[in-house]
Image (tube, rainbow, N blue to C red):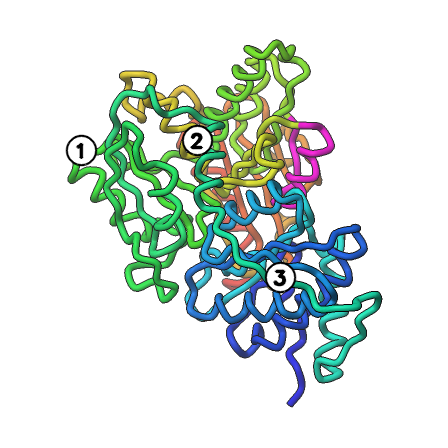
Amino acid sequence: MHPPRLAEFVKTYDVRGLVPDQLSPAVARALGSAFAQVVVLPDGGSTLVVGHDMRPSSPELSRQFAEGAAEHGVDVTVIGLCSTDGLYYASGALDAPGAMFTASHNPARYNGIKLCRSGARAISLDTGLAEVRDLAQWILERGGLHERPGATQTGRILERDVLGEYADFLRGLVDLTAIRPLTVVVDAGNGMAGLTVPAVLDGLPLKVLPLYFELDGTFPNHEANPLEPDNLRDLQAAVREHGADLGLAFDGDADRCFVIDERGEPVSPSAVTALVATREIAREVAADTPAEDITVVHNLISSRAVPEIIAEQGARPLRTRVGHSLIKAQMAEHDAVFGGEHSAHYFFRDFWFADNGMLAAMHVLAALGTTQRPLSELVADYSRYVASGEINSTVTDAAAATERVRRWAQEQGDVVEDTLDGLTLTHDAAPMWWLNLRASNTEPLLRLNVEAADGATMERVRDGALALVRQDEKE
């Protein structure tokens, strides 16, 4: 039987495949061996941190990965059940490369691996993951046989619980002890937030009403993907039923957090980005950092309000392409204090430039807990425009569809083009609007985002662009 082709499920930024057809124990072991040889040892390291989520396959897969790395003399610290940001904490605090076994929000039949260098530094196909993939493929095709250059003895596999350290670290970054009492409904989606939320938030002036805190990688209630509106319905209903101040929804590995206001309405991740950015800029200024020396990163799908608000605080907004590895690299290069994505990934300099949904949630709680205003009024200050959200279309020729939209947009007059990530078309004259079209790297999809000064304009641009994108599929 031939081994699976790793190129089919080793993605740009991580590993994500079906269990066991693609990601099997043998594949995990080969990837651990390759990671030790390509990343850990060449970087001058001798240790590795491995954690896993609550999926039924995660313990065995992570154990095989650890054993594959240990064969090369690498000592492995196994931290067991954790969120992805918990793994990043361990990688940063222990200054060791890390491997987190999770498929995040994917359905139960999937699993995957998020890898990082020491200090939670991102890794992608362009920065080492391709070499890990190719060496692991070579190992698998030779029946698991591989060389052990320089390894005189097998590394140790040690267990360590870092949950308490992780919680203490976050509580040291955002002080919630003096906020007014708040009632918050938290939907963990049977994912890792069921473990991390009590560890971080217990003992604070918060009444936490839990939804689906039982760790269950079969996701019996709903998929742990808050990007899908249907997966927010239970949380929205619970916020309204209990008269809560807000709701928080985490994805499966708890590195992303979505916010619901007291009315049960979703809060745009861009509004959360602007809110947290304002707080982080103010903290830096209070520490005597000139505002003009402070950088905040946002991706190009974020609301136009985000760079506007950052600039109004005197700081520097830095626009980047979509993708967490890209944002982490930009943040490190520019020593950015904070970064946000439209997909509810939030990155913090004080957290090794890594993303942390829990930390973003704590900032929202801190902001709300120091005002008597309801959350809907608070975030209205950061919500200036009307957005379509990301709309995916299956297309056979993404380039042709994009060109149709480009020609149509130019007929609207005063449209500026840029190609930082896909095609962005901006109409600055009244009424303001912009759109972005990006082709998926892995699927025949074209992703459309539209934002405008008002709802009618957004709908006009959205509907016009969508009709052109989907033109061939209707013929």
- Tags 3 and 2 touching, CB below 8 Å: no
Look at the numbered disc 1 and give the secondary structure of its residue. Answer: loop
* Residue placed under numbered mark 1 in the picture: 243
Note whether residue 315 is visible.
Answer: yes
Residue at 48%, 66% in the rendered image: 58
In the rendered structure, the answer to whether residue 444 lies left or right of residue 149 reads: left
Q: Disc 3 or 2, which lies upstream in sequence?
A: 2
* Residue placed under numbered mark 3 in the picture: 442
Q: Residue furthest left?
A: 241
Magenta residues, dominant SS class: helix
Location of residue 134 with respect to 40 vertically, above or below: below
**Kind of residue sitting beneath label 3:** Thr
Stretch of the chain drawn in magenta? 318-335
Q: Nearer the viewer, mark 3 or mark 1?
A: 1
- In x, y percent, where is residue 412? 59, 33
Location of residue 462 with respect to 17 vertically, above or below: above
How far apart are the alpha carbons under marks 1 and 2?
26 Å
Look at the numbered disc 3 and give the secondary structure of its residue. Answer: loop
The one nearer the camera, 32 or 309, is 32
**Kind of residue sitting beneath label 1:** Gly
Look at the numbered disc 2 and give the secondary structure of its residue. Answer: helix
- Say which quadrant the N terminus sits in: bottom right
- In x, y percent, where is residue 53? 46, 58
Q: Disc 3 or 1, which lies upstream in sequence?
A: 1
Few, some or many C-alpha atoms within 10 Å of disc 1 (few <14, some 14-19, many ≥20)?
A: some
The image quarter containing residue 330 is: top right
How far apart are the alpha carbons under marks 3 and 1?
42 Å
